[in-house]
Amino acid sequence: PDARPAYKRILLKLSGEALMGDGEFGIDPQVIGRIADEVAHINRLGVQIGMVIGGGNLFRGAGLASAGMDRVTGDHMGMLATVMNSLALQDALERIGIFARVMSAIRINQVCEDYIRRRAIRHLEKGRVVIFAAGTGNPFFTTDSAASLRAIEINADVMLKATKVDGIYSADPLKDPAAERFTQLTYDEALRRNLQVMDATAIVMCKEHAMPLKVFNLNNPGEIVRAVCGEDVGTTVVR
Ligand code: UDP
Protein backbone atom coordinates (compact mmCIF):
# COMPACT_ATOMS: atom_id res chain seq x y z
CA PRO A 1 0.00 0.00 0.00
CA ASP A 2 2.88 2.47 0.61
CA ALA A 3 4.59 1.37 -2.57
CA ARG A 4 5.29 4.23 -4.95
CA PRO A 5 4.68 3.96 -8.68
CA ALA A 6 7.75 3.80 -10.90
CA TYR A 7 5.85 5.16 -13.91
CA LYS A 8 3.68 8.20 -14.61
CA ARG A 9 1.85 6.83 -17.64
CA ILE A 10 1.44 3.21 -18.66
CA LEU A 11 -0.23 1.15 -21.34
CA LEU A 12 -1.62 -2.05 -19.87
CA LYS A 13 -2.46 -4.84 -22.31
CA LEU A 14 -4.71 -7.73 -21.29
CA SER A 15 -5.60 -10.63 -23.53
CA GLY A 16 -9.28 -11.35 -24.00
CA GLU A 17 -8.65 -14.78 -22.56
CA ALA A 18 -7.65 -13.17 -19.30
CA LEU A 19 -11.31 -12.26 -18.80
CA MET A 20 -12.58 -15.84 -19.13
CA GLY A 21 -11.25 -17.09 -15.81
CA ASP A 22 -11.76 -20.85 -15.77
CA GLY A 23 -14.44 -20.64 -18.46
CA GLU A 24 -14.10 -21.45 -22.15
CA PHE A 25 -15.74 -18.33 -23.55
CA GLY A 26 -16.99 -14.94 -22.48
CA ILE A 27 -16.37 -12.82 -19.42
CA ASP A 28 -16.16 -13.98 -15.81
CA PRO A 29 -17.59 -11.15 -13.65
CA GLN A 30 -15.39 -12.10 -10.73
CA VAL A 31 -12.23 -11.98 -12.80
CA ILE A 32 -13.06 -8.64 -14.39
CA GLY A 33 -13.94 -7.30 -10.93
CA ARG A 34 -10.53 -8.30 -9.61
CA ILE A 35 -8.76 -6.72 -12.57
CA ALA A 36 -10.78 -3.53 -12.03
CA ASP A 37 -9.74 -3.50 -8.34
CA GLU A 38 -6.07 -3.65 -9.28
CA VAL A 39 -6.45 -0.98 -11.94
CA ALA A 40 -8.30 1.19 -9.41
CA HIS A 41 -5.40 0.73 -7.00
CA ILE A 42 -2.80 2.05 -9.45
CA ASN A 43 -5.18 4.81 -10.60
CA ARG A 44 -5.37 5.99 -6.97
CA LEU A 45 -1.57 5.99 -6.83
CA GLY A 46 -1.77 8.66 -9.53
CA VAL A 47 -0.62 6.57 -12.48
CA GLN A 48 -2.15 7.52 -15.84
CA ILE A 49 -3.53 4.33 -17.36
CA GLY A 50 -4.27 3.47 -20.96
CA MET A 51 -5.51 -0.06 -21.59
CA VAL A 52 -5.91 -2.39 -24.54
CA ILE A 53 -7.94 -5.58 -24.24
CA GLY A 54 -7.91 -8.41 -26.72
CA GLY A 55 -10.94 -10.25 -27.99
CA GLY A 56 -9.78 -13.85 -28.00
CA ASN A 57 -12.34 -14.86 -25.34
CA LEU A 58 -15.07 -14.11 -27.90
CA PHE A 59 -13.78 -14.15 -31.49
CA ARG A 60 -10.51 -14.24 -33.37
CA GLY A 61 -10.34 -13.53 -37.09
CA ALA A 62 -7.84 -16.30 -37.77
CA GLY A 63 -10.02 -18.86 -35.96
CA LEU A 64 -13.14 -17.80 -37.84
CA ALA A 65 -11.19 -17.90 -41.13
CA SER A 66 -10.02 -21.45 -40.48
CA ALA A 67 -13.68 -22.39 -40.06
CA GLY A 68 -14.31 -20.96 -43.54
CA MET A 69 -15.26 -17.35 -42.91
CA ASP A 70 -13.82 -14.49 -44.93
CA ARG A 71 -10.76 -13.33 -42.98
CA VAL A 72 -11.53 -9.63 -43.06
CA THR A 73 -15.08 -10.24 -41.82
CA GLY A 74 -13.63 -12.43 -39.08
CA ASP A 75 -11.21 -9.67 -38.10
CA HIS A 76 -14.09 -7.21 -37.98
CA MET A 77 -15.83 -9.55 -35.56
CA GLY A 78 -12.63 -9.84 -33.53
CA MET A 79 -12.33 -6.07 -33.31
CA LEU A 80 -15.97 -5.76 -32.24
CA ALA A 81 -15.26 -8.41 -29.59
CA THR A 82 -12.59 -6.13 -28.12
CA VAL A 83 -15.19 -3.36 -27.94
CA MET A 84 -17.47 -5.61 -25.88
CA ASN A 85 -14.63 -6.50 -23.52
CA SER A 86 -13.71 -2.84 -23.22
CA LEU A 87 -17.29 -1.88 -22.33
CA ALA A 88 -17.36 -4.58 -19.67
CA LEU A 89 -14.14 -3.28 -18.16
CA GLN A 90 -15.37 0.32 -18.29
CA ASP A 91 -18.46 -0.81 -16.40
CA ALA A 92 -16.44 -2.76 -13.82
CA LEU A 93 -14.26 0.31 -13.19
CA GLU A 94 -17.18 2.73 -12.92
CA ARG A 95 -18.91 0.47 -10.43
CA ILE A 96 -16.03 1.00 -8.05
CA GLY A 97 -15.85 4.74 -8.63
CA ILE A 98 -13.11 4.99 -11.25
CA PHE A 99 -13.75 7.20 -14.27
CA ALA A 100 -13.10 5.37 -17.51
CA ARG A 101 -13.60 6.05 -21.22
CA VAL A 102 -13.70 3.57 -24.06
CA MET A 103 -12.25 4.99 -27.27
CA SER A 104 -12.72 2.91 -30.40
CA ALA A 105 -10.50 2.76 -33.47
CA ILE A 106 -13.66 1.98 -35.45
CA ARG A 107 -16.41 4.58 -35.32
CA ILE A 108 -19.31 3.37 -33.19
CA ASN A 109 -19.81 6.61 -31.38
CA GLN A 110 -23.24 5.88 -30.00
CA VAL A 111 -21.58 3.22 -27.89
CA CYS A 112 -18.25 4.80 -27.02
CA GLU A 113 -15.98 7.64 -28.05
CA ASP A 114 -13.96 7.63 -31.24
CA TYR A 115 -10.23 7.36 -30.72
CA ILE A 116 -8.75 10.83 -30.99
CA ARG A 117 -5.23 10.99 -29.68
CA ARG A 118 -5.35 14.47 -28.15
CA ARG A 119 -8.62 13.72 -26.45
CA ALA A 120 -7.22 10.46 -25.10
CA ILE A 121 -4.28 12.31 -23.59
CA ARG A 122 -6.63 14.84 -22.04
CA HIS A 123 -8.59 12.02 -20.38
CA LEU A 124 -5.35 10.54 -19.06
CA GLU A 125 -4.27 13.88 -17.64
CA LYS A 126 -7.60 14.14 -15.86
CA GLY A 127 -7.02 10.76 -14.24
CA ARG A 128 -9.49 8.80 -16.34
CA VAL A 129 -8.62 5.28 -17.41
CA VAL A 130 -8.69 5.18 -21.21
CA ILE A 131 -9.58 1.83 -22.77
CA PHE A 132 -8.50 1.67 -26.39
CA ALA A 133 -10.95 -0.59 -28.21
CA ALA A 134 -11.18 -2.17 -31.68
CA GLY A 135 -7.44 -2.77 -31.92
CA THR A 136 -5.78 -0.71 -34.63
CA GLY A 137 -9.05 -0.57 -36.58
CA ASN A 138 -7.50 -2.67 -39.37
CA PRO A 139 -7.78 -6.34 -40.20
CA PHE A 140 -4.64 -8.53 -40.14
CA PHE A 141 -3.34 -6.83 -37.00
CA THR A 142 -3.52 -7.97 -33.40
CA THR A 143 -4.30 -6.22 -30.18
CA ASP A 144 -0.63 -6.60 -29.23
CA SER A 145 0.19 -4.38 -32.19
CA ALA A 146 -2.60 -2.02 -31.15
CA ALA A 147 -1.10 -1.91 -27.65
CA SER A 148 2.38 -1.02 -28.88
CA LEU A 149 0.94 1.57 -31.25
CA ARG A 150 -1.11 3.27 -28.54
CA ALA A 151 1.72 3.02 -26.00
CA ILE A 152 3.98 4.89 -28.43
CA GLU A 153 1.28 7.40 -29.42
CA ILE A 154 0.44 8.38 -25.86
CA ASN A 155 4.10 8.45 -24.82
CA ALA A 156 3.69 5.80 -22.17
CA ASP A 157 6.71 5.15 -19.95
CA VAL A 158 6.22 1.42 -20.32
CA MET A 159 3.96 -1.14 -21.91
CA LEU A 160 2.80 -3.78 -19.46
CA LYS A 161 1.58 -7.03 -20.91
CA ALA A 162 -0.40 -9.18 -18.49
CA THR A 163 -0.40 -12.87 -19.47
CA LYS A 164 -1.03 -16.29 -17.94
CA VAL A 165 2.65 -17.04 -17.34
CA ASP A 166 5.23 -15.43 -15.07
CA GLY A 167 7.18 -13.79 -17.89
CA ILE A 168 9.14 -14.78 -20.96
CA TYR A 169 10.72 -18.23 -20.93
CA SER A 170 13.35 -19.95 -23.04
CA ALA A 171 10.61 -22.45 -24.02
CA ASP A 172 6.92 -22.92 -23.22
CA PRO A 173 6.93 -23.42 -19.42
CA LEU A 174 3.60 -25.26 -19.60
CA LYS A 175 5.20 -27.91 -21.86
CA ASP A 176 8.91 -27.91 -21.08
CA PRO A 177 9.93 -28.28 -17.41
CA ALA A 178 13.48 -27.13 -18.24
CA ALA A 179 12.22 -23.76 -19.52
CA GLU A 180 13.88 -20.83 -17.77
CA ARG A 181 12.45 -17.40 -17.17
CA PHE A 182 14.38 -14.33 -18.34
CA THR A 183 14.41 -11.32 -16.05
CA GLN A 184 15.62 -9.04 -18.82
CA LEU A 185 15.86 -9.46 -22.57
CA THR A 186 16.42 -7.33 -25.67
CA TYR A 187 13.94 -7.07 -28.51
CA ASP A 188 16.53 -8.50 -30.90
CA GLU A 189 16.98 -11.58 -28.72
CA ALA A 190 13.23 -12.06 -28.50
CA LEU A 191 12.97 -11.90 -32.29
CA ARG A 192 16.05 -14.02 -32.99
CA ARG A 193 15.05 -16.78 -30.59
CA ASN A 194 11.45 -16.56 -31.79
CA LEU A 195 10.25 -16.30 -28.18
CA GLN A 196 6.48 -16.10 -28.01
CA VAL A 197 6.34 -12.63 -26.49
CA MET A 198 4.10 -10.83 -28.94
CA ASP A 199 3.79 -10.94 -32.71
CA ALA A 200 6.76 -9.58 -34.63
CA THR A 201 4.90 -6.44 -35.76
CA ALA A 202 4.29 -5.44 -32.15
CA ILE A 203 7.89 -6.22 -31.13
CA VAL A 204 9.39 -4.26 -33.99
CA MET A 205 7.21 -1.23 -33.18
CA CYS A 206 8.39 -1.27 -29.57
CA LYS A 207 11.99 -1.77 -30.61
CA GLU A 208 12.02 1.05 -33.13
CA HIS A 209 10.51 3.48 -30.66
CA ALA A 210 12.45 2.24 -27.61
CA MET A 211 9.26 1.41 -25.73
CA PRO A 212 10.14 -0.82 -22.77
CA LEU A 213 7.89 -3.81 -22.25
CA LYS A 214 7.21 -5.77 -19.09
CA VAL A 215 5.51 -9.17 -19.32
CA PHE A 216 4.04 -10.63 -16.13
CA ASN A 217 1.39 -12.99 -14.79
CA LEU A 218 -2.06 -11.53 -14.32
CA ASN A 219 -3.14 -14.56 -12.29
CA ASN A 220 -0.82 -13.61 -9.43
CA PRO A 221 -2.99 -11.32 -7.29
CA GLY A 222 -1.43 -7.87 -6.88
CA GLU A 223 0.97 -8.34 -9.78
CA ILE A 224 -0.25 -5.28 -11.73
CA VAL A 225 0.45 -3.12 -8.69
CA ARG A 226 3.90 -4.68 -8.20
CA ALA A 227 4.77 -4.25 -11.88
CA VAL A 228 3.74 -0.58 -11.75
CA CYS A 229 5.76 -0.03 -8.59
CA GLY A 230 8.85 -1.27 -10.41
CA GLU A 231 9.20 -4.48 -8.44
CA ASP A 232 11.14 -7.22 -10.11
CA VAL A 233 8.27 -9.24 -11.53
CA GLY A 234 8.09 -10.99 -14.87
CA THR A 235 10.42 -10.17 -17.74
CA THR A 236 11.48 -6.75 -18.97
CA VAL A 237 12.24 -6.31 -22.66
CA VAL A 238 14.35 -3.34 -23.70
CA ARG A 239 16.23 -2.10 -26.71
N1 UDP B 1 -8.09 -7.60 -34.63
C1 UDP B 1 -7.89 -6.98 -35.85
N2 UDP B 1 -7.13 -5.84 -35.89
C2 UDP B 1 -6.53 -5.31 -34.79
C3 UDP B 1 -6.71 -5.97 -33.54
C4 UDP B 1 -7.50 -7.11 -33.50
O1 UDP B 1 -8.40 -7.42 -36.86
O2 UDP B 1 -5.86 -4.25 -34.89
C5 UDP B 1 -8.99 -8.78 -34.55
C6 UDP B 1 -8.31 -10.07 -34.94
O3 UDP B 1 -9.26 -10.88 -35.64
C7 UDP B 1 -8.00 -10.70 -33.60
C8 UDP B 1 -9.19 -10.27 -32.77
O4 UDP B 1 -9.46 -8.95 -33.24
O5 UDP B 1 -7.91 -12.09 -33.66
C9 UDP B 1 -8.98 -10.27 -31.29
O6 UDP B 1 -7.74 -9.71 -30.93
P1 UDP B 1 -6.52 -10.60 -30.39
O7 UDP B 1 -6.47 -11.90 -31.08
O8 UDP B 1 -5.29 -9.73 -30.44
O9 UDP B 1 -6.97 -10.81 -28.89
P2 UDP B 1 -6.21 -11.53 -27.66
O10 UDP B 1 -5.41 -12.69 -28.22
O11 UDP B 1 -5.31 -10.51 -27.05
O12 UDP B 1 -7.32 -11.93 -26.76
Image (tube, rainbow, N blue to C red):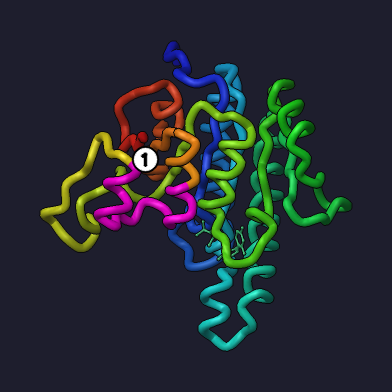
x, y percent for residue 50:
62, 35
In this view of the protein, which residue sits in the foreground, 228 or 194?
A: 194
Tell me the quadrant of ligand 1: bottom right
x, y percent for residue 111:
83, 52
Rendered residue at 64%/66% (across/down): 139
x, y percent for residue 9:
57, 25
Range drawn in magenta: 187-204
In this view of the protein, which residue sits in the foreground, 192 or 30?
A: 192
* Residue at mark 1: 216
Q: Is mark 1 within 8 Å of ligand 1?
A: no
Which residue in the rendered view is the most extreme toward the bottom?
Answer: 68
Rendered residue at 44%/11% (across/down): 2
Q: Is residue 227 visible?
A: yes
Q: Residues within 10 Å of mark 1 (few under 14, many from 20)?
A: many
Rendered residue at 40%/48% (across/down): 163
Which residue in the rendered view is the most extreme toward the left?
Answer: 178
Which quarter of the figure has residue 143?
A: bottom right
- Say whether residue 192 is magenta: yes
Rendered view: 150 above or below 125: below
- Taken as a whole, is the magenta stretch helix, strand or loop? helix
Rendered residue at 58%/60% (across/down): 55
Which quarter of the figure has residue 116?
A: top right
